[in-house]
Amino acid sequence: MPSSSSAMVTGLTAAALVTIGVLGYQAAATVPAELGKPRASASPSPGLSKAPRDKRHPDALPAGSGTGERVVYSVDDDRVWLVGAGDRVRRTFEVTPSTVDPAPGTYAVTSRSNRITGSDGTPVEHVVRFTSVDGVVIGFSAAVDDSAAAKAAQGSKTGGIRESRADGDAMWDFATIGQKVVVVR
């Protein structure tokens, strides 16, 4: 016959697991459905087409990339801008693109992971996810060994947009859950 203390521990453990499950379910249920999905607009936004660039300043923020605090990612230029209050560029840097590109549009950061193994088998850190395309999750990350290029197997689809570790640290600090991400061509 089990002692009353082990029965109490078993009961408390079961209650804790049920509580964690319920809280996890509630948290998942409260995430707005539109997070991580492009928003439709009545007319095309200039930021959704090829954004004009300042040829004299290649690091300049693309015109038509929105307003307010946001992450701007140019698929064609393989560049990211972290834009703070007053539309001031806090940091810009080049990235190595994933094999699957997100569509131009406005998204929000939906999840983050401090350290995981990427879909290409590379240990990565500071993963900031904002959408998925045909089941492939798209987000920014930095390889722990600071290698930029994803080592995708021939024909495989990956969604990791790779940054340097220093740029990954900056993205991690800036792009918290709900942060706007604008993707332009």
Image (cartoon, helix red, strand yellow):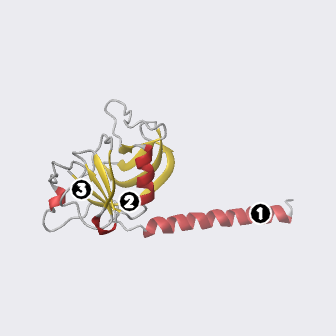
- Element class at badge 1: helix
Q: Nearer the viewer, mark 1 or mark 3?
A: 3
Residue 136, disc:
none
The residue positioned 62% from the left and 65% from the top of the image is 18
Q: Position of residue 84 (x, y in %)?
A: 34, 64
* Residue that numbered label 1 is attached to: 9
- Identified by mark 1, the residue type is Val
Q: Nearer the viewer, mark 3 or mark 2?
A: 3
- Element class at badge 2: loop
Foreground pick, 152 / 11: 152
The residue positioned 39% from the left and 65% from the top of the image is 178
Residue 109, disc:
2
The residue furthest top is 154
Q: Looking at the image, is mark 1 or mark 3 earlier in the sequence? A: 1
Which quadrant of the rendered structure holds the N terminus?
A: bottom right
**What is the C-alpha distance between the residues marked 2 and 1?**
39 Å
Instruction: Sort mark 3 into few (<14), some (14-19) or many (20+) by Cα contacts within 10 Å.
Output: many
Q: Looking at the image, is mark 2 or mark 1 earlier in the sequence? A: 1
Q: Nearer the viewer, mark 2 or mark 1?
A: 2
Q: Is residue 108 left or right of residue 116?
A: left
Residue 61, disc:
3
Q: Position of residue 76 (x, y in %)?
A: 21, 45
